[in-house]
Amino acid sequence: MKQIQDHYFYKAKKDGYVARSVYKLQEIDQKYHLLAKRNRVLDLGCSPGSWLQYAAKQVGKKGEVVGIDLSVVSLKLPENVSVVQADIFDYPFQEEFDYPFDVILSDMAPKTTGVKSVDAQRACNLCERALHIASHHLKPAGVLLVKAFQGGPFEQLRRNFQQQYSRVKVYKPKSSRQESVEIFLLGLQKK
Ligand SMILES: C[S@@+](CC[C@H](N)C(=O)[O-])C[C@H]1O[C@@H](n2cnc3c(N)ncnc32)[C@H](O)[C@@H]1O
């Protein structure tokens, strides 16, 4: 993952987080109160692991965080975190998870080509997959947070969220670079 060496990069080092992306989740969590003690959380696209670190603290020892990523997470993680190395398009979620999550997070990013329309579609495919996984594995009234790309298929994605969640928010955290097309889509209160 490309690291931007700005204020948040150095702050992450100081605070003991493995990536600056943690401050996007922290800001959204502080605004919308996504994560609570004892929650069971699924983190899609979790490597190198800063969201796992943050979520593990928020849910506490009686909560649980499960991460999944194509890449290995080499970080030493707390006992309430487990990680699977897999592709979310192939992983047998139905067989592996027999009880639902309170919160599903996705900071997944596709391999980019530089062609805007292709990259936006790839990002959207990851979000649609997260939405589908949540339709089976998120509790009623649960929360789904995904990173999306602005433009292209984004408006359709937002409408798809609106069909499945009572409240849908679009949010650009301060730590997300202004020039980046990334934007977060939050589904609250799964119907
Ligand atoms: C921006 S990074 C996530 C950073 C992470 N939230 C953190 O704070 O450390 C995006 C991740 O999405 C993962 N990813 C992309 N496509 C994936 C897929 N199909 N299945 C699983 N993980 C995927 C990538 O391997 C990459 O590690």
Image: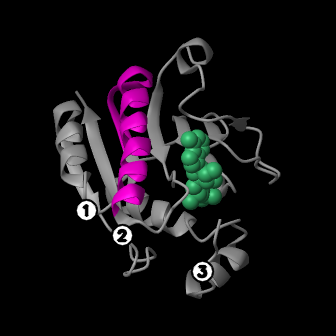
> Measured along the vertical axis of the image, is residue 90 above or below residue 20?
above
Mark 2 or mark 1, which is nearer the start of the sequence? 1
Contact, CB < 8 Å: mark 3 with mark 1?
Answer: no
- Label 1 to label 2, Cα distance in Å? 8 Å
* 15 and 74: which is toward the camera: 74
For the record, the magenta segment spans 117-144
Determine if the magenta segment contains residue 137: yes
- Disc 2 crowd, CA 10 A, few/some/many (<14, 14-19, 20+): some
* 19 and 124: which is toward the camera: 124
| Residue located at (36% from left, 51% from top) | 121
Q: Would you say residue 58 is visible in this rendering?
A: no
User: What is the three-letter code of the residue carrying label 2?
Assistant: Val
Determine which residue is flagged by label 1.
151
SS for callout 1: loop
Contact, CB < 8 Å: mark 1 with mark 2?
Answer: yes
- Disc 1 crowd, CA 10 A, few/some/many (<14, 14-19, 20+): few
Mark 2 or mark 3, which is nearer the start of the sequence? 3
Determine which residue is flagged by label 2.
181
Determine which residue is flagged by label 3.
4
